[in-house]
Amino acid sequence: MEQDTDAAAVSTSPRNRLLDAADELFSRDGIARTSVDQVLHRAHVAPGTLYAHFSGKDGLLVAALRRRLDRWDRLWQDAIDAAASPADKLLALFDAVSTYRGRYTPGRGCAFLATSTELPDPGHPAHAVITAESTLLLTRLNQLAGAVTTDDPASLAGDVLLVYDGAMAGLQRGRTPDPLGQGRALASRLIRTRIETQ
């Protein structure tokens, strides 16, 4: 089985292998605990390849986060497009996370929040991607909440975001069997209550 994994790794481009390795190892073990040598070994590439593509560990981290954000953005939009009602489109946030975790490296929770915690310096280049992810969440949830209610949609969006953040923390704790499902159910009740009291 290990040989099959290695063969699959070698069949993709060196750049993608580096991104895959970084995404997996940073998410699983943390950024500080993951050495460049570990990433190189996992990706089956020489040091010069990493520096040619990314200039170093920080550049690799930023590229891995950008790729994760692009994938997340597309999957979330696909889930919204597939949802039938405005309420379901707002709840698609939780469906998209489940799809993402099934398709890509799941990690222990939210990679963006984890990176922000591990690298608190706002001057670190990764913070531009973290900010972009936060902006995407807030902007899109506000737009979707506006289609559900005209009664303070920003408040509803904030409530859904708070539940989402709690569900992502639940994934990291690993003590609840289905934090995403529970989060979706709680957010659904919040949305239904808001609709009923309009």
Image (cartoon, rainbow, N blue to C red):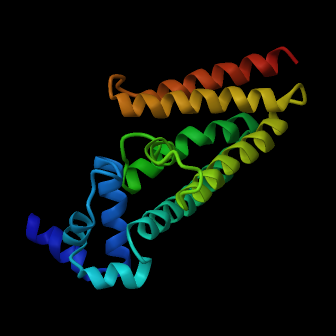
Where in the figure is residue 193, as x and y percent of width and height?
A: 74, 16
For the point 76% across and 38% down, the residue is 86
User: Is residue 180 visible to the viewer in this orientation of the structure?
Assistant: no
Q: State how many labels appear.
A: 0
* Residue 124 shown left or right of residue 20 in the figure: right
Q: In terms of depth relative to the viewer, which is nearer, 120 or 78?
A: 120
Q: Is residue 90 above or below residue 100?
A: above
Residue 1 placement: quadrant: bottom left
Residue 152 placement: quadrant: top right
Where in the figure is residue 120, as x and y percent of width and height?
A: 51, 45
Q: Is residue 174 above or below residue 14?
A: above
For the point 48% across and 68% down, the residue is 63
User: Is residue 96 visible to the viewer in this orientation of the structure?
Assistant: yes
* Residue 41 shown left or right of residue 32 in the figure: left
Where in the figure is residue 69, as x and y percent of width and height?
A: 55, 58
Q: In terms of depth relative to the viewer, which is nearer, 27 or 8?
A: 27
For the point 58% across and 54% down, the residue is 127
Q: In terms of depth relative to the viewer, which is nearer, 115 or 143?
A: 115
Where in the figure is residue 71, as x and y percent of width and height?
A: 53, 61
* Residue 18 shown left or right of residue 158 in the figure: left
For the point 72% across and 42% down, the residue is 138
* Residue 31 shown left or right of residue 78 in the figure: left
Q: For the C terminus, which image quadrant? A: top right
